Image: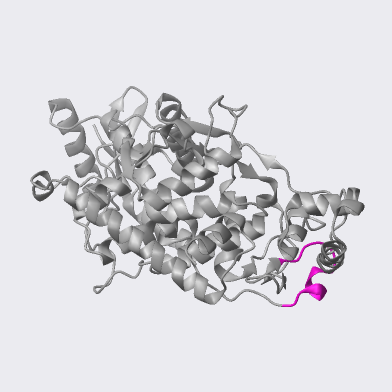
């Protein structure tokens, strides 16, 4: 029979499970009940043991630690590499430090609430904590299915433990920009990288709403005269490997492209003549660039920067350096002056092409400086303005030692807080601005609306045509506004677009 165990200021009831194994009388939340008297504790223990013998009470679950269970659980998963990576990060960095030594059966909702409170105090973003809790909920739900506990303590009861009122966990609203903002941003990225690729990619992202992985993983074979087929994406793993996998949520789709965008992208592929990459053996529309990971600190300006400053081709600059007698004297003097102004050092280390962009490097050294006009804080380097040589407009980034001293200007912000993903929000916003039907917006964004209303909604050729016309009108207005600022650009592809309409 059961017995009462004294724990100083209170008693607890203990009852027999099996030879040599005993359990404690617990309440519905799984917490040990503290009895004031020995008699009450023994009576409750006897009652629990009687229920067990009669078969009306389940035996308490096997006592397995969270650490042991979660290792077994993770090994049993068979999911996409990106999902497995995310689960591993959630488990190793946030769940194991808090729950590793807990028995699965002993984890209480109050333990989880205390863990959340500690994570918020770090502070981590509310959305991140929500994601980690969802992983914990999934793990514990499987533990319930395996009979290791009776209920899932990570299941949240609405409003429980919170004061009334609006949610306190709302993050800042996502920053977006305009059609002109997309154009100026793409131009600046091309100036920072020293090539046209970032200009084309920025325009494609802003006018299609494609995800980052879909842009990086865009294969030339899926660029078509009137559309882009989203069939694959490249997902960057923590190991640095770029994993070729289906688009998020299997959102395969054809994205209609206006004539200007199709022409821009086709022209880029024709000029670049991309070759299959070594990592996948696939030909992609865009390649990465070494300066994306170090353009701010890399010593020495590039030959392309000198050419842009003077308004001549890279070949002309090369001739000035190698065969000065074949170059007209006024041009040669201008090139030499630009070399001095920009601090160009012949044969200095420069950025190398890479098979693909890297998300962090692209955002840090190209996108964010283009959007804000400032290099972000990185390591020992403080946040600082991008140093600019003023001419030709909108300026050429000055590089190398003493760049700040040689700077004549700096960029004003286009859209503070804008991120590469913010261009996806921007595309959705622009579509809504021109009254695009929700069904067509969802198709372009790769979203799925499972409502009954959506099932009875259909996309017509007229809807597609209207959207293409609206996007084209936005593009032309942006070009006109940019031309009003300055009729030319140091970015060759944009310069030809501006002059073609004069």
Q: Is residue 195 magenta?
A: no
Q: Is residue 420 left or right of residue 29?
A: right
Towards the viewer: 320 or 239? 320
User: For residue 402: magenta?
Assistant: yes
The residue shown at (52%, 63%) is 498
Q: Is 270 positioned to the left or the right of 42 in the image?
A: right
Q: Nearer the viewer, residue 485 or 319?
A: 319
Give the residue at the far top of this rendering. Answer: 19
Residue 361 lies, in percent from the top left, at 62, 51
Image spot of residue 344 (x, y percent): 84, 59
Image location of residue 333, percent across then percent down: 87, 66
Which residues lie in the magenta part? 397-408
Asked whether residue 95 appears in the rendered view, the answer is no
Q: Residue at x 45, y 70 (%)?
A: 480
Residue 453: image location, x then y, percent: 9, 50
Q: Residue at x 35, y 29 (%)?
A: 62
């Amino acid at each position: 029979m059961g017995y009462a165990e004294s724990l100083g200021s209170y008693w607890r009831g203990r009852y027999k499970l099996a030879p040599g194994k005993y359990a404690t009388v617990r309440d519905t939340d799984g917490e040990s009940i503290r009895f004031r008297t020995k008699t009450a504790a023994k009576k409750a223990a006897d009652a629990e043991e009687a229920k067990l013998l009669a078969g009306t009470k389940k035996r308490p679950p096997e006592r397995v630690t969270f650490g042991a269970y979660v290792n077994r659980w993770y090994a049993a998963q068979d999911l996409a590499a990106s999902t497995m990576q995310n689960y591993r990060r959630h488990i190793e960095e946030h769940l194991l430090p808090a729950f590793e030594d807990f028995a699965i059966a002993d984890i209480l909702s109050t333990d989880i609430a205390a863990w959340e409170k500690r994570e918020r105090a770090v502070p981590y973003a509310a959305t991140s904590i929500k994601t980690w809790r969802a992983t914990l909920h999934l793990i514990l739900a499987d533990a319930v299915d395996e009979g290791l506990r009776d209920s899932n303590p990570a299941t949240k009861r609405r409003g429980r433990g919170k004061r009334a009122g609006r949610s306190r966990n709302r993050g800042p609203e996502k920053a977006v920009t305009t059609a002109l903002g997309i154009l100026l941003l793409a131009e600046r990225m091309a100036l920072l990288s020293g090539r046209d690729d970032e200009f084309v990619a920025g325009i494609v992202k802003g006018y299609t709403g494609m995800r980052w992985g879909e842009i990086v993983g865009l294969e030339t074979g899926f660029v078509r005269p009137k559309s882009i087929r989203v069939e694959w994406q490249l997902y960057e793993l923590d190991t640095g490997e770029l994993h070729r996998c289906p688009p998020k949520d299997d959102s395969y789709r054809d994205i209609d492209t206006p004539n200007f965008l199709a022409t821009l992208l086709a022209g880029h592929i024709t000029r670049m003549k991309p070759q299959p990459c070594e990592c996948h053996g696939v030909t992609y529309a865009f390649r990465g660039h070494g300066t994306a990971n170090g353009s701010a600190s890399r010593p020495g300006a590039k030959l392309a920067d000198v050419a842009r400053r003077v308004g001549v081709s890279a070949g002309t600059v090369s001739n000035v350096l190698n065969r000065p007698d074949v170059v007209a004297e006024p041009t040669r003097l201008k090139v030499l002056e630009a070399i001095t102004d920009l601090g160009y050092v012949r044969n200095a280390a420069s950025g190398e092409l890479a098979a693909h962009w890297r998300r962090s490097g692209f955002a840090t050294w190209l996108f964010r400086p283009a959007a804000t006009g400032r290099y972000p804080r990185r390591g020992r380097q403080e946040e600082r303005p991008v140093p600019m040589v003023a001419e030709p407009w909108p300026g050429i980034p000055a590089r190398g030692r003493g760049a700040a001293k040689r700077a004549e200007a700096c960029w004003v912000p286009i859209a503070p807080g804008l991120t590469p993903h913010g261009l996806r929000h921007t595309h959705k916003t622009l579509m809504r601005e021109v009254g695009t039907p929700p069904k067509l917006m969802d198709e372009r964004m790769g979203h799925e609306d499972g409502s009954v209303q959506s099932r009875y909604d259909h996309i017509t050729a007229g809807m597609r045509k209207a959207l293409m016309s609206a996007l084209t009108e936005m593009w032309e207005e942006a070009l006109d506004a940019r031309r009003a600022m300055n009729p030319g650009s140091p970015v060759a592809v944009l310069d030809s677009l501006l002059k073609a309409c004069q």
